[in-house]
Image (cartoon, helix red, strand yellow):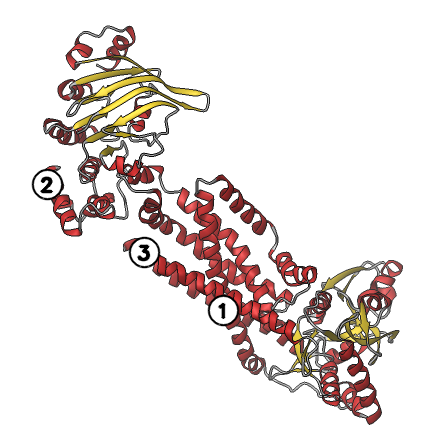
Amino acid sequence: MGKIRIEGLHKSYGSNQVLKGIDMQVQEGEVVCLIGPSGSGKSTFLRCINRLEEITAGRVTVDDHDLNDPKTNINKARENIGMVFQHFNLFPHFSVLKNIMFAPMELGKMNAEQARTTALRLLERVGLVDKAESFPSQLSGGQKQRVAIARALAMNPDVMLFDEPTSALDPEMVGEVLGVMKDLAREGMTMVIVTHEMGFAREVADRVVFMDGGYIIEEGAPEEVFGNPKNERTISFLEKVL
Amino acid sequence: MKFRKLSLFTISLMLLMLTGLSGWVRDAAAEGAPGKTYVIGTDITFAPFEFQDASGKFVGIDMDLLEAIAKDQNFKYEIKPLGFNAAVQALEAKQVDGVIAGMSITEERKQKFELSEPYFQSGVVMAIGKNNDSVKSYEDLQGKKVAVKTGTEGYRFAESIAAEYSFTIVPFDDSAQMYEDVKTGNSVACFDDYPVLAYGVNQNNGLKIVTEKEVGGSYGFAVNKGMNQELMNKFNAGLANLQTNGQYDQILEKYLGENASQPVQQSRWGLIMESLPALLNGLGKTLLYTIVSLFIALIFGLIFGFMKVGRNRFLRGVATVFVDLFRGIPLIVLAFFIYFGIPQAFGFTMPLFLAAILTLSLNTGAYVTEIIRGGIQSIDRGQMEAARSLGLPYRKAMIKIIIPQAIRIMIPALINQMVITLKDTSILSAIGLVELTQSGKIIIARTFASFDIWLVVAIMYLLVITILTKLSGYLERRAHRG
């Protein structure tokens, strides 16, 4: 499980059209990196995949859930779609452990014992077992983001969405977060990542999607898009960032 | 657990409403029944007609007369010391059955009320500061300020000659304040009924009388037209009996005669100690009204605060109207409206405590609503998004993630609001609530010791507020740690 299908997606804020018709499919286990200049609509697009943004037209389907169908239980659907934010959004009044245990327990997925075991296993995976009892304010940016990833994984989702996960980090901390993400990709997680880390995209992505002005301009394997871009706008963007 | 707490809130709220309701239902049911207890409104500071003695009992010519008449005519009554203006308004609003407050019989009042046979012949005199030798007649008032009490004969008289002698009128709500204004020199003179001023001078209020009595009106007891005719008949009959059997003269002699009681010479400290029980009692009332009102305001605040951050446009509108309305009306106007206005319009009796608590809770509730809205909206949007993205429903995310964080942000503002509400209870003295400020006023009406009593009252407020603030600060730090 972990299939995403997007058809004819439009999104406007009032008269401001942000997404102007997007079609895309993501296969199970596929890692897709969304790149493009700021304001191109890539974050908005990502947020439509778990309906943090209400769409204006089109259809977003994750596995069997048509997210915008009124009959869909959106909370149930979201349990299967993990999300990692640029600004971490850890719960500051909870310890690291509680941050991770909270959702599975609150939603009746696990009892306290199971949740604790899971949380500790995930913390080990992101290398932060010793921070279990710390509070988010005591962590560095990179540590916070790794906890945020563990928190999303605790619900055992089939899809993970990453919204510029390293943009708010000091450069020396980018590596530790990307490392965790690489491991995830290797384990077969379906991932959609909005990123400015071109090196990471080239190395990890199965497919790179270049967006600009609310459209998908060009997409393909990383060596295609980075090595041999066809569209003028892609070329000009890559010239600036590489 | 959540539910239990919520239902506890609701139950207490309903209990409160019920006790309030039963209060006026009982009053209404008692109407006309034999052995009915009449509620009589009066002034608080109109010595020698009504004032509180050192033991806290209401005494004075009016009080003694009423007591004697009630005995003679065999009826029961209950005194409500409201202040003159409030008493008259309470009568209009049918909150009391009658008013005895040294009320002059005027054509205007005859239009509105049923007035008894005159029971006292009065007249207006002018008084000035004890050490003032420059003012001897009305001519000397030119360009000066003159203190008067609203709604009195003294006011009407001053008004009638203000243009002729070109002085300015400064109105006050009670005699003590009026005397104080003259003593401190803000006003050069004051006008009041002869017996009142004479008594005050007798009690060392710091003034002296410099004019002859203007031939004035007489005092009468008032009820509403067409209501309580029986009470009026009894009053007139009892008054006639007292005048025949000499009791009437005895009462007047007691307060106005040569042998009228002189004030006991008392040290300032002794006076303060003597006043303490009454002041502490008032302080207790202040705290009680503050706590109950805050509690209800918190419930209002929670309901309307969540309506304001919610997604339902209609509920948002309702909450906005609530806040704008009760934040936009001055507390004293709201108190008058609830205690005098609404009962008059709908013809029922509103218990004072209910009016006081409603006023404070609605006003405070409007502010608490804004505090809660602000607290919730100050939490970063990402918190809600993170919670929702994990699959949490809106309510759960609100309760477990947003509110706990918002509360920490709200605490200082809520403490601030608590202090404001505590101080605002003093405004309710205007509708006769005997809280700390009113207790102070009553004592000063008897003793004229403004400085000492207001100092004690101020210190009491200061102490209580400081203690509460420190305590809250301690709790706040704990909440942050926990």
> Would you say B73 lies left or right of B454 here?
right
Query: Which residue occupies 41% across, 47% down?
Result: B375
Query: Which residue occupies 34% across, 34% down?
Result: A71
User: In the rendered structure, which amino acid carries the disc numbered 2?
Assistant: Glu
Point out residue A36 in the picture as x, y percentages from the top left corner.
28, 17
> Would you say A188 lies left or right of B25 here?
left
Point out residue A220 in the picture as x, y percentages from the top left corner.
19, 13
Q: Which residue is mark 3?
A: B479
Q: Which residue is mark 2?
A: A124
User: In the rendered structure, which amino acid carries the disc numbered 3?
Assistant: Ala
Point out residue A65 in the picture as x, y percentages from the top left corner.
27, 30
Give the Cα separation between the discs numbered 3 and 1.
25 Å
Point out residue B67 in the picture as x, y percentages from the top left corner.
71, 86
| Quadrant of the drawing holding the N terminus of chain B | bottom left
Q: Which mark is residue B288?
A: 1
Which of these two is toward me, A120 or A107? A107
**Residues indicated by labels 3 and 1 sit on the same polypeptide chain:** yes
